[in-house]
Image (spheres, grey):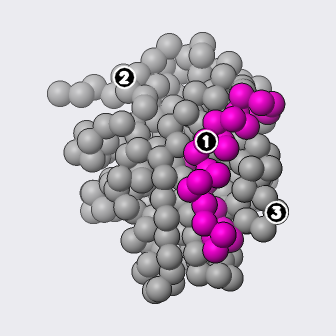
């Protein structure tokens, strides 16, 4: 399908977490149409091998290309960590992940040169944030930790109160050294818990939400490629899922910050 400046931006994630990235995109580029794909039949990606995540990511991209998208946002830290090279090699459109923009924001933020990263086991094991930060700011000290319990807490709406606070203290209190002044929320679920995380780490630590940095990078790249939408034509929001949509619609409203108009179930047709 043909893609041009009036085509939509494609966004995919393993489930609902990428809706935090979509929310940032909608705020930064409100006139751009979007097509969001949540691979809810195969969620989570964070516990799967790099080869499997790459296979899933290529299928996601293939489906979004059928919708004529002009740019692809990989709104999943795990997929961004392992699948970006394969996607950029095979796709005829620009591809942006969430790790490079997030790492750039963290590298610019830190004054002490000591950055911490939290994410899913897959993202942390990949070392993608560590490599990106070292490349952007040689000599930076990066410590990283997987915090898998944050994901179900966010999806269940347990983002305030003692339960998430206990989990955050367990993960972060002994992990952060006094030198750390920047903490990257390396999972798209984690921004929902940012208030609790901020209370635990204290005001001296800046939290980096990759979603906002990614949205800014999308705006820059669309301008560079002369793909920004012109005029005031209708804005369309499409939501696709690979499992039945009921839970996606329920949980997704919390991540997007507004009700979802509906979602259509699709088949990725794995061979």
Q: Is residue 168 in the magenta section?
A: yes
Q: Closer to the observer: label 2 or label 1? A: 1
Quarter where residue 5 is shown: bottom right
Against 161, residue 156 (above or below) is above
Q: Are marks 2 and 1 in contact (CB under 8 Å)?
A: no
Which residue is identified by label 1? Answer: 170
Quarter where residue 84 is shown: bottom left
Name the foreground residue: 203 vs 21: 203
Which residue is identified by label 3? Answer: 203
Check disc 2 and report its element: helix, strand or loop. Answer: loop
Q: CA distance from mark 3 to mark 2?
A: 45 Å
Task: Provide residue 29's location: percent of width, then percent of height.
Answer: 72, 57
Question: At 37% from the left edge and 61% from the top edge, which residue is drawn?
Answer: 127
Q: CA distance from mark 1 to mark 3?
A: 18 Å
Check disc 1 and report its element: helix, strand or loop. Answer: helix
Task: Provide residue 225's location: percent of width, then percent of height.
Answer: 53, 73
Q: Residues within 10 Å of mark 3 (few under 14, many from 20)?
A: few
Question: At 33% from the left edge and 28% from the top edge, which residue is drawn?
Answer: 268
Against 104, residue 148 (above or below) is above
Q: Earlier in the sequence, mark 2 or mark 1?
A: 1
Check disc 3 and report its element: helix, strand or loop. Answer: loop
Question: At 51% from the left edge and 32% from the top edge, which residue is drawn?
Answer: 15
Magenta residues, start to end: 159-188
Which residue is identified by label 2? Answer: 267
Q: Is residue 42 in the magenta section?
A: no
Task: Provide residue 105's location: percent of width, then percent of height.
Answer: 63, 71
């Amino acid at each position: 399908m043909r893609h041009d400046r009036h085509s939509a931006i494609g966004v995919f994630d393993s489930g609902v977490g990428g809706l935090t990235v979509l929310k940032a995109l909608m705020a930064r580029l409100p006139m751009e149409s979007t097509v969001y794909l949540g691979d809810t039949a195969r969620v989570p990606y964070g516990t799967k091998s790099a080869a499997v995540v790459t296979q899933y990511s290529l299928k996601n991209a293939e489906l979004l290309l059928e919708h004529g998208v002009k740019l692809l946002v990989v709104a999943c830290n795990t997929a961004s960590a392992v699948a970006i090279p394969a996607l950029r090699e095979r796709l005829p459109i620009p591809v942006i992940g969430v790790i490079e923009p997030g790492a750039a924001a963290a590298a610019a933020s830190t004054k002490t040169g000591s950055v911490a990263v939290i994410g899913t086991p897959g993202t942390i094991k990949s070392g993608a944030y560590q490599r990106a930060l070292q490349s952007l700011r040689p000599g930076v000290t990066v410590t990283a930790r997987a915090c898998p319990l944050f994901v179900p807490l966010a999806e269940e709406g347990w983002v305030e109160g003692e339960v998430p606070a206990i989990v955050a203290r367990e993960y972060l209190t002994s992990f952060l050294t006094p030198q750390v002044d920047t903490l990257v929320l390396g999972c798209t679920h984690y921004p929902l818990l940012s208030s609790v995380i901020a209370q635990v780490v204290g005001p001296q630590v800046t939290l980096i939400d990759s979603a906002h940095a990614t949205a800014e990078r999308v705006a820059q790249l669309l301008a560079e490629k002369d793909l920004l939408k012109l005029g005031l034509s209708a804005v369309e929001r499409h939501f696709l899922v690979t499992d039945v949509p009921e839970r996606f619609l329920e949980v997704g409203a919390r991540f997007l910050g507004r009700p979802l108009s509906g979602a259509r179930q699709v088949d990725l047709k794995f061979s």
